[in-house]
Structure formats: structure tokens, C-alpha cells
Amino acid sequence: MPWDQIGILVIGLPALWLTTYRQFRIRRWAYILGLVSEVFWIWTCVAHEQWLILGSVAAYTFVWGRGFWEHWLRKDGDNGA
């Protein structure tokens, strides 16, 4: 069974959907799910030797990480709460 692809579908798609949610306290969970989904992207890239796609996975991981920083860790400024 392609567990890597199931993980992308079950975790990655809700992460993307949550980025459009209106309420901040719910929308901020998108970045945690997004980071978790990157594990499955890395897994599938390595398993299928898709080395060029792995570069874009690094970029997506950076973007999800930035959102995590802004919505969970940053203490100064307006975080939308």
C-alpha cells in the first residue's frame, strides 16, 4: 500500500484547506499539518528517487515552517489573534 501517498492525501490536503479558513485559531493548524505532511513528501521522493522534486519539497518545508513561526512561535507584533 502506498502509505506515503495516503499520508500526503490525508494530512497535506487538509493543511492546504485550513490555510483558507477564516478563524485564526483554526487556520493556524494548517502550518502544523503542512509540516507533518512534508515527512510524507520526503518519503515519497526518496522512495521513488525523485531528487529534483526533493528541492521543491525543501522550499515548501521552508514556507510551512515560516507559517509555523508566524502563527505559533512569534511573540511580537500582530499574529492575527
Image (cartoon, rainbow, N blue to C red):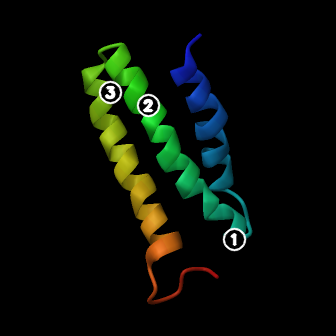
Quarter of the picture containing the N terminus is: top right
Query: What label sits on residue 8 in the rendered view?
Result: none
Q: Position of residue 67 (x, y in %)?
A: 47, 63
Q: Where is residue 20 in the image (x, y as percent from the top left)?
A: 67, 56
Using the image, determine if residue 45 lies above or below residue 26: above
Q: Which of marks 3 and 1 is in front?
A: 1
Give the residue at mark 3.
53
Q: Do tag 3 and tag 2 residues touch (Cβ < 8 Å)?
A: no
Is residue 12 or residue 22 the one in the foreground?
12
- Mark 2 is surrounded, within 10 Å at the Cα level, by few (under 14), some (14 to 19) or many (20 or more) other residues, namely many
In the drawing, does residue 73 fall left or right of residue 13? left
Q: Do tag 1 and tag 2 residues touch (Cβ < 8 Å)?
A: no
Quarter of the picture containing the C terminus is: bottom right
Mark 3 or mark 1, which has the lower sequence index?
1
Mark 3 or mark 2, which has the lower sequence index?
2
Circle 1: residue type = Arg
Give the residue at mark 2.
41
Is residue 13 or residue 46 the one in the foreground?
46
Give the residue at mark 1.
25
Q: Where is residue 45 in the image (x, y as percent from the top left)?
A: 36, 23
Q: What element carries label 3?
A: helix
Which of the 4 image quadrants contains residue 79?
bottom right
Q: How far apart are marks 3 and 2 (CA)?
A: 9 Å
Q: Do tag 3 and tag 1 residues touch (Cβ < 8 Å)?
A: no
Using the image, determine if residue 29 lies above or below residue 7: below
